[in-house]
Image (spheres, helix red, strand yellow):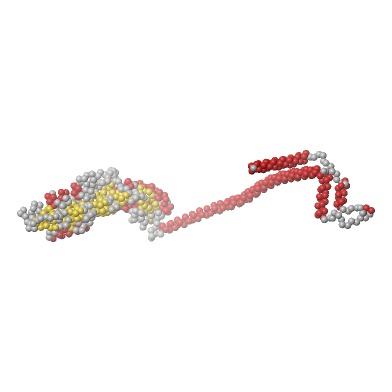
Amino acid sequence: MGIVEKWWSFRGSLNEQIIALKGEAGFQPEVLRGGIHFRTPLMYKVHVVPLVTIPQGQIGYVFARDGKPLEPTQTLGKAVPECNNFQDVRAFLENGGPKGPQRGILREGTYAFNLAQFIVFTEDKIYYLPMGNKEEKEMIDNMAQILRQRNAFRPIIITEDKEGIVTVHDGPSLPSGDIVAPTVGDDPSDPETYHNNFQDPEKFLKAGGFRGRQLQVLVEGTYFINRLFATVELIDKTVVEVGYVGVVVSYVGPKEQNTSGEDYKHGELVEKGFRGVWKDPLMPGKYAFNTYAGKIVKVPTTNIILKWISNQTGTHRYDENLKEVSLITKDAFEPSLPLAVVLHIDYRKAPLVVQRFGDLKMLVEQTLDPMVSAYFKNIGQKKTLIELIQQRDEIQKMASEEMKERFAHYNLELEEVLIGTPMSSPNDNKIDAILEQLRDRQIALEQIETYSRQQKAAEKERELREAEARAAQQKLLTESEINIQIQTNQGKAEYQRSLQEAQKIKALAEAEAEKEARIGIGRAIAIEEQVKAYGGPQYQVLQDVMGKFTQALEKTGIDIVPETVVAMGEKASSASFNAFEMLLTLLLTKELGIEFKVKETEDENVKKIKQEILNSILLAKESDKKEEIKENSQNLQQENNVS
């Protein structure tokens, strides 16, 4: 683009201004854009300059060479909406645009600026038309250095766990007595004054904002803020850990009526947003708290252990300057008493504690330490050293009860008092001697008790031995009684077995006798039938005799006919010495001596058995006959089926 400079004019030249709005000689407000323009070199000179480009994600700053002078209380020139982002020089000047650095900033884009009127600062380049003024060159370099120091060409990016404390460098000053400017223009429903977290300086000032450090803070996000108008300090957010509450002491805000009550004479508690100690503490969490506008005193809500012991401290380290309580006993000993106190602070009373003592360490050192020390010094004066040692539990319980009321007076809750063993000083061994005597006395008492218990144990052991002896004899007696019972049971069992055996033998004998009887009767029937078959009993006897005789001859090998016969006398020639013939002769004669008689009567049982045998034989024959008929019928049926 081209910046037109008029060398001469009938209207004359400018006195104080740089831009000629009425055609005077000097730099003209309008610029020439791309194209062909006709200007006589006798009257005009055209300065060709590049367009101004603001890269993406960056900020550009504007300095006006000409315009209305700034007010004494102003640091930056107010914005002129009619000038189209400083691209219309005539509108800027005619609407009262001020000279100097401007409140308005340039965002990403390309602009056609009259660089005779405006100087544009970017991160990489400064756009302006040099006029040979050395002082102006120094001013431009100084302003560029300030912007780079503030990292002003980049937006403010706030990440997690951080917050931004804003300091405004323009606008009216704070009233006397205020150190932090109150929050203004933070209501999005009011577009006339909502400055959107200091990104619109005009609306901030219109809402009544003051210069100086602001109460309102910036949280996570990206902010395009004119760093000549406001700077931002990044700090960590305030974290109230679990087990604590945060008591807010506010340095800013209007004064409010006291809420702690007329009976509380140690300060005032106020509502949130007012100056003073807030009556409601902050619960555990993370807060974007402006640490320049107040402070947060963290008060533990868990049990606090304070140790009056040298070189030992509790978790919270409020007792790092405490040491053992020096006592003077009733018997003029001077022991040191180590002790510990467990206390608790109600979270609702934490603001009262902070309002009264400032912080807990001052409470411990300036109040609790002298109070606890004085209490135990008074107890020590009423007790001897041995009583102080032996009555430790009673003193501990009494102290816990009596000191609760004193602690409650300071809005504290006493949980327990723990007392240690009195100790002697390094240069005094008298307490150790007393303790040694006390230990010897205790050892003697323990020995007496031990002997007594041993005696009782011996008596108990004797009773135990007697009981064991009785128990052993009782065992033998019991075993003998059990053996008698076992023998009795075994005798009964044997008797029962003998009875069962006798019955068994009897049954077997009867069965065997019946068997023999039946066999004998069966044989008798068979013999009778054989006798009938042979024609008489004599023939049956003859057959039996002949059979046995034959068997005897076979076994002995006696010749039936002798090889040599010696006969003497008259009948020798006719006598036969053949044994076979002699046997036959006896059998055929009555000289055998056997008389065959038939028994006319028989026993009834024999008859009954004989009849049962005959019946069974008949039944067997009939069954065999039926079976034969059935088999013949089946064979005939099969032949019929085949045919």
* Count of labels in the image: 0
Q: Which quarter shows the C terminus?
A: top right
Question: Observer-nearest residue: 102 or 210?
Answer: 102
Measured from the top left, where is residue 279 in percent x and y?
29, 46
Question: Observer-nearest residue: 398 or 48?
Answer: 48
Residue at figure coordinates x 79%, y 40% from the top left? 603
Snapshot quadrant of residue 533 = top right
Q: Is residue 118 left or right of residue 353?
A: left
Question: Observer-nearest residue: 388 or 302?
Answer: 302
Residue at figure coordinates x 11%, y 54% from the top left? 28
Measured from the top left, where is residue 635 in percent x and y?
67, 43
Q: Is residue 99 left or right of residue 561?
A: left
Q: Which quarter shows the N terminus?
A: bottom left
Snapshot quadrant of residue 19 = bottom left
Measured from the top left, where is residue 280 in percent x and y?
30, 46
List the single residue furthest toward the front. 643
Q: Is residue 485 left or right of residue 216?
A: right
Q: Is residue 88 left or right of residue 511?
A: left
List the single residue furthest toward the right. 570
Question: Observer-nearest residue: 637 or 513?
Answer: 637
Measured from the top left, where is residue 587 in percent x and y?
86, 48
Q: Is residue 502 visible?
A: no
Residue at figure coordinates x 39%, y 59% from the top left? 428
Q: Is residue 390 visible?
A: yes
